[in-house]
Amino acid sequence: MLTTQYAPSKQSGNGVAVAFSGSFKILAATDLAVYKIDASGNQGVLLILGTDYTVVFDPTQETWTVTFTVAPVLGGYALIERVSDNTQEAELPSEGPMPAKVVETMADKLQAQIQEIQASIAALVLQGAAVSIQTGSFAQLSALAALAPTTPFWGFVTDDETIRFYTGNIALGTNGWTGPIGGV
């Protein structure tokens, strides 16, 4: 049962520590999106599981640990988000007893997706700006972001069917992508 609230994990780096733990529930190691934020506040690209970091998680205790191959820098951060895919892989029997654990996992996945959307909306509200919705390939949306680097927008990425939020920051002149939300 999903018993915790969700908020992305943003933990301070010191240039030495490589392991960062958290307690929002995930159903698989691939449910995490992991980034590093440098000392200037710039969010890097989405890191690659198995290359840039590893994940150990305990689904019973609802805890996980991300271990980076290279530690986040002093003054920087490890940013770890939950990104549940939008597939339903469970099968319920047409006859016989209802498998409680399967039903619970299905409900947990839906709740996790709702929490992720709520976190994205909260980030949008914190931006305090009217935000447009754009559709295109990730390359097209990245080009749009480069033209107006401080203007946030929601983007539906047609090449991987995800929704991403581009965060432009007028005060800091920084920008980056959060998400993906959903995906295939």
Image: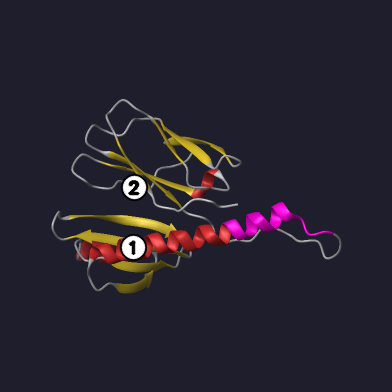
Element under disc 2: loop
Q: Position of residue 177 (x, y in %)?
A: 32, 56
Mark nearer the N terminus (1 vs 2): 2
Type of amino acid at the residue the image marks with label 1: Ala
Residue 122: assigned label: 1
How far apart are the two marked residues, 1 and 2, measured between alpha carbons?
22 Å
Q: Residue at x 52, y 55 (%)?
A: 84
Residue labelled with disc 2: 45
Taking the magenta stretch, the answer to whether it contains residue 98 is yes
Q: Residue furthest right?
A: 96
Q: Which quadrant would residue 151 be assigned to in this image?
A: bottom left
Q: Residue at x 31, y 25 (%)?
A: 16
Element under disc 1: helix
Q: Residue at x 26, y 33 (%)?
A: 73
Which residues make up the magenta segment? 97-108
Q: Residue furthest left?
A: 171
Up-down: is 123 above or below 25? below
